[in-house]
Amino acid sequence: MSEAFSIPGISRGPEGGSAFGESRNGDVLIVVPCLNEEAHLPALLRGLLGNAHGALVVVADGGSVDASREIVTLLSRKHANLVLLDNPQRIQSAAVNLAARRFGAGRNWLLRIDAHAHYPDGFLDSLRLSAGSMRASSVVVPMVTSGTACFQKAAAAAQNSVLGTGGAPHRHLGRGQWVDHGHHALFDLKLFMAVGGYDEGFSANEDSELDRRLIAAGGRIWLEPQAAITYFPRRTMGALFRQYRKYGIGRARNLKRHPVPVKLRQMLPLAVVPSILMALIGLALAPLRIEALVFAFPMLCWMVAALVAGAILGCRARSFCDAGAGVAAVTMHAGWSLGFIEETLSRQQLPAPPQPLGFESVVPPEMRGVRRMSGEALIA
């Protein structure tokens, strides 16, 4: 890494930074799964480290090819409680499990942080207060989306409305309540390890699948509205479609593992791909029988409803970009429906459910000179 590399908003400090392990969050492990997040890491880590109060922050990198790794390495020179961990499996579920096994010994709480989001000051302290007052084994948070580029703003408008979320409790600001799922944040680390952590066979929807096992093991999940985070959605239609296709695959796999009735807000998008296929059949038959165009009616209704709803959102926000929420919603619905149907029709067997995780013994990251963790601790 070049010594000339710099991070806007972060200045070099004295080697080793402030004292570690002498404050109230010394029993907390913070894990940040990461893959090519150079645009978000500087501000995210600056906020996390400023509010860590003794917590260990582990960035589990899945092979970034941008400046993400250099950003973490540079910051670790002034913060003894920041570690870069290689995540060979690349996916988030494996990243959190690996960090928990390697660095969780002696700690009581696990905080999962998404690199693609903004967290408010005092986030960890707020979650710990909620966990203590509510006697919760997991505290989840609401998520509000925000964008800068035009399509990203359209996706954010859709995801902040029923149009894109179906009214899920954790996708809007509301009251605190016990839930069966929410955006993951704080866990009782012992319970997390006991149920096997995340299922590494899931590249998406691993959070909801874990919540099923936490509840089955007697855990209670509290949704804390005062700790809402800001999420930054995908910037292009293609990236958004691929993301939601993965969500659909993950949701179908979850239902295979934990069969439960599908909620109405999930059933409606399921009809999207079938309606598109019906429309294509109708268009193909139309030259022979014009009445075959009736097969396109369901798809037409869906698209018109989504586009009109998006236009209404744009008018309310007085934003041309927000008016594209319907286009973003159509993209999300189609991706989710395709992924769900793909996985439902797949004959691939799910791997066995996760087994309890155990802690590993490594050189403590508090030791001065530790810069990076892979198979073994590397000491400068």
Image (spheres, grey):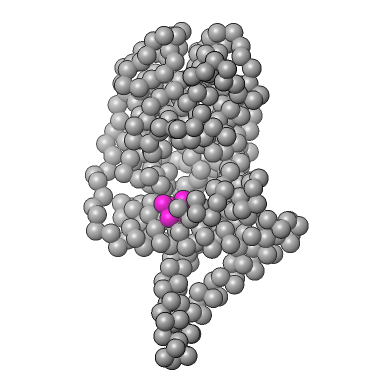
Q: Residue at x 24, y 58 (%)?
A: 347
Where does the magenta region start and end?
243-247
Picture quarter with the C terminus: top left
Place of residue 315 in the rendered image (x, y in percent of width and height, measured from the top left): 74, 62
Residue 293: tell me if it is visible.
yes
Place of residue 11 in the rendered image (x, y in percent of width and height, measured from the top left): 64, 17
The one nearer the camera, 309 or 42, is 42
The one nearer the camera, 222 or 249, is 249
Q: Residue at x 51, y 58 (%)?
A: 332
Place of residue 196 in the rendered image (x, y in percent of width and height, measured from the top left): 32, 36
**Dividing the picture into quarters, in which one does residue 318 lie?**
bottom right
285 over 171 or under it: above or below: below
**Dividing the picture into quarters, in which one does residue 320 lie?**
bottom right
The one nearer the camera, 280 or 250, is 280
Q: Residue at x 58, y 30 (%)?
A: 44
Horizontal relation, residue 151 to residue 290: left or right: right
Q: Residue at x 49, y 79 (%)?
A: 296
